[in-house]
Amino acid sequence: MVQTKHDIIQEIDQRFDRLFQWLEQQPAERFSQGPEGKWTTGQHISHLIKSTKPLNMALRLPKIQLKAMFGKPNRPLRSYDEVVQRYQEKLAGGGVSTAQFVAEESKATDKSGLIAELDKERGKLTKIIAKWEEEKLDKYLLPHPLLGKMLIREMLFFTIYHTEHHTKSLEDKY
C-alpha cells in the first residue's frame, strides 16, 4: 500500500520505468501511430509531460504561496485507492483532459526527445518530493482539473496511477 513519501517516490519510479521499458521496445515509426480516433504513443507521452511539469513547478512554490492560492484542507486525506476510484468515476462519467493537458501530435523522430524529457521531469519530481517534509504533504492543496482540490499526497497518488493508466492503455491498445 502506497502511503509514505518513500513509498510514493518508489512507486513513481517503478511506474515510469515500466512505461520507459515498454516504449523502448516499440519501433520509432509506431510512435506517431495509434488506434483510430485515439491518441498516438507520442501523444500519451506528451500528455504525461504536460501533466508532470506543472506539478513540479507547483511543488517548488513557497508553502505560504500554496496556502494563499489554494486554501487549506477541510477534509481528511484520501487513500491511494480512493483517489483512483474517484478518477475512474470521473473518466466513466465522460471526464477528459482539459485543453492545457491535451497532447500534441508527434513524429517518429520525436520519440527519444520526448522520452528523455519525460524522464527528466520524473527525476525532478522525485527530487522535489524527497525535499518535502512527510507531514507537509497533507497540509497543502493543489487543484486538479477533474478531481478538484487535492492534498499534495493525493496529487502524488494520482500521478502514480495516471502514469500506470497511460502505460496500461498503451500496452493494451498499441
Image: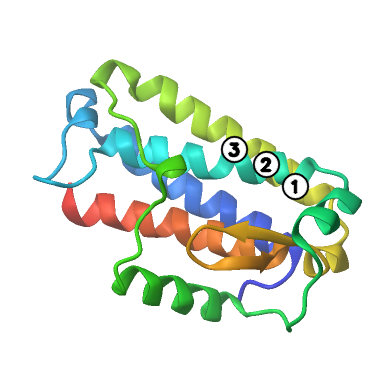
Q: Nearer the viewer, residue 32 or 72?
A: 72
Residue count near mark 1 (Cα–Cα under 10 Å), binned few <14, some 14–19, many ≥20: some
**How many angstroms separate mark 3 from mark 2 (CA)?**
5 Å
Name the image quarter holding residue 56.
top right
Q: Secondary structure at mark 2?
A: helix
Q: Secondary structure at mark 1?
A: helix
Residue that mark 1 sits on: 59
Contact between labelled residues 2 and 3, with CB atoms less than 8 Å apart: yes
Residue 106, numbered circle: none
Q: Please indicate whether residue 161 sits to the left or right of residue 37 in the image.
A: right
Residue that mark 3 sits on: 53
Name which residue lies at 54% across and 74% down: 83
Residue count near mark 2 (Cα–Cα under 10 Å), binned few <14, some 14–19, many ≥20: some
Q: Is residue 22 visible?
A: yes
Q: Position of residue 107 (x, y in %)?
A: 25, 21
Q: Please indicate whether residue 23 sits to the left or right of residue 142 in the image.
A: left
Residue that mark 2 sits on: 56
13 up-or-down from 110: above or below: below
Contact between labelled residues 2 and 1, with CB atoms less than 8 Å apart: yes
**How many angstroms separate mark 3 from mark 1 (CA)?**
10 Å
